[in-house]
Image (cartoon, rainbow, N blue to C red):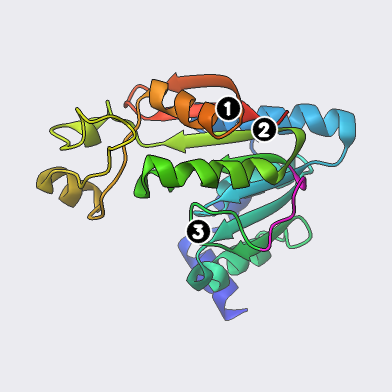
Amino acid sequence: VLYQLQIFKAISAGAFYDRLNAIPWETGNDEMERLALEECAKRQRIDHSVSVLILPADQCDLAFRFAQLGAVVTVADAPEKQQEIEGRILAAGLADMVSFQACTLPEPPTPGNPGRYDIIVLRRGLCFQSYQKSKPTIRRLMQQLRIGGKLFLSILGLHSELGDDYPGREQSIYERFAPLTEDVAKKYGISAPVCLYSERDVFLLLLESGASVLRTLTTTWGNVKAIAVRV
């Protein structure tokens, strides 16, 4: 109870429920999240039972949007965030629709449930491991999807500000894994080595991981989004 009160001190009840009651697929400037929500709405009209996995949970706003559409949602994040996230879920009154599972990003929760999900949204995490390590991660995520299920992927872009003077910029994607420049690392709070991707690199990653690529795009800010389907 105390934890819920702390949440509502930070976010007024009125503003909180205004967000929940908004049109679900109005997500600001994130095209990939909008497309994922629209996919959920279409599936819900046909199947009336849609299962979604989101990594990481962040503030749970996206999870609540999916729940508003009638989906059963699992949010996955680091174990130490469980209390905070479950508090948000309880405060929203969505404990019947949204649940938490611990994971080590960007890996899906274990033990997994092969063929469980209709939609998986991976918002970030792949960049913090090498390209070669990311291929089995993508395979494991795809295995969690039902046949015909879709993975919505967001990844830090080589042609974003993060790529300015990036030491790995001229390297092959198979070798690229390096820290950002000192100024950029400090600005974005990213001290670990990263693998930044072009749109072509993301397409190749999905293809070599056994996924069928439906769409890729590069945002105005240079980050890369992709949609893949399990066939």
Residue type pointed to by label 3: Ile
Q: Main secondary structure of the magenta part?
A: loop
Q: Nearer the viewer, residue 18 or 141?
A: 141
Up-down relation of residue 183 to residue 91 (above or below): above
Range of magenta residues: 111-117
Q: How many marks?
A: 3
Which three-letter amino acid code belongs to the residue tagged 1? Ile
Cα distance between the residues tagged 2 and 3: 32 Å
Q: Position of residue 169 (x, y in %)?
A: 21, 30
Q: For the N terminus, which image quadrant?
A: bottom right
How far apart, in angstroms, are the residues tagged by discs 3 and 1? Answer: 33 Å
Residue wearing tag 1: 227
In the rendered structure, find residue 28 and report the number of the disc placed on it: none
Q: Residue at x 36, y 30 (%)?
A: 223
Q: Are marks 1 and 2 in contact (CB under 8 Å)?
A: yes
125 drawn magenta: no
Residue 150 numbered mark, or none = 2
